[in-house]
Image (cartoon, rainbow, N blue to C red):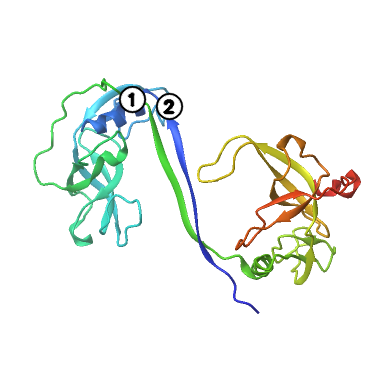
Amino acid sequence: MPDVLKAPLVVEFPFTRSLGPVQSAFLTGLRERVVLGVRTTDGRTLVPPVEYDPVTAEEIRDLVEVAPTGTVTTWAWNHAPRRGQPLDTPFAWVLVRLDGADTALLHALDAPGPDAVRTGMRVRVRWAAERSGAITDIACFEPYDGEPAQPGGHRGDFADPVTGIVAPARLDYTYTPGRAQTAHLDALAGRRIVGERCPSCRKVYVPPRGACPTCGVATSERVEVGPRGTVTTFCIVNIKARGLDIEVPYVYAHIALDGADLALHGRIGGIPYDRVRMGLRVEPVWTEGARHPDHYRPTDEPDADYDTYRELL
């Protein structure tokens, strides 16, 4: 049996959001080295601030400054910081109740080791050298044995307020396709498309999953399908993806390969986007060194009859 493949995989995208008046003031305040909370009607001060009272669901906008000093309420030691975390040396994740606040803020504490951290210890904000209006404007917290700092009474009115943020989302992991998909990928390297047949319903699935999604039984009989197939359904893509060197508009389709009982995804090329249609007969186009077809193009065969692929829509 060939070795099962594995490879690092990164899923990443920037998440852009606009800010309401409360979050805008909070993040703008951090840029100006001011920590703001929001006061509820019963007198509690919430830091970080929220726009609605978590108890009553009442809208709240009464901003109030709190001190950059506070008390650790709980903590956990991080022995091995990961990419993008606040510090690149071991540190403590802490919940800090800032002086003047009734709730705690999660951030990092720069400490020499876990023996130097305890619940109840006093800390203060260490501001980042360059600030832009983000939670990272607080570089971290650090131990502090002085008197509580006194807030200046800021009410959240700033020139040039922050109105939106971009938060990068990223997931790094190692993908292992398993026995069935490893065989499928090995076949693709040889420009062959291989699926597996269910021993019960006799359907052929491409790409294979190692088990029939209908019957739930294991599959092992390998079946070569295609390479030609039929477009069952499709969409026209009009938004260009970052890092993808394909001009819009283009067509992405479900393609039922000859001999397969499950349609797979593929890009359609070699034809104007507005001429792609259901039933169009296509074949794969390979590029040098690629492990999978670059796209599918028309074969100039007559369109497939609808009844031949309606069960695969």
The residue at the far left in this view is 146
- Crowd band around label 1 with a 10 angstrom C-alpha radius: few (<14), some (14–19), many (20+): many
Dot 1 corresponds to which residue? 40
- In the image: residue 304, left or right of residue 4: right
Q: For the point 62% across and 62% down, which residue is it?
A: 291
Residue 4 in picture, x, y percent from top left: 59, 72
Decide: marks 1, 2 in contact (CB < 8 A)? Answer: yes
Instruction: Please name the amino acid that badge 1 sits on.
Output: Thr
- Image quarter of residue 223: bottom right
- In the image: residue 213, left or right of residue 42: right
Q: Nearer the viewer, residue 181 or 81?
A: 181
Instruction: Please name the amino acid that badge 2 sits on.
Output: Thr
Q: Which element is circle 2 on?
A: loop
Whether residue 2 is visible, yes or no, is yes
- Quadrant the N terminus occupies: bottom right
Residue 256 in picture, x, y percent from top left: 79, 52
Residue 117, above or below 159: below
Residue 274 in picture, x, y percent from top left: 74, 34
- In the image: residue 167, left or right of residue 189: left
Dot 2 corresponds to which residue? 56
**Mark 1 or 2 closer to N-term?**
1
Q: Which element is circle 1 on?
A: loop
Residue 193, above or below 262: below
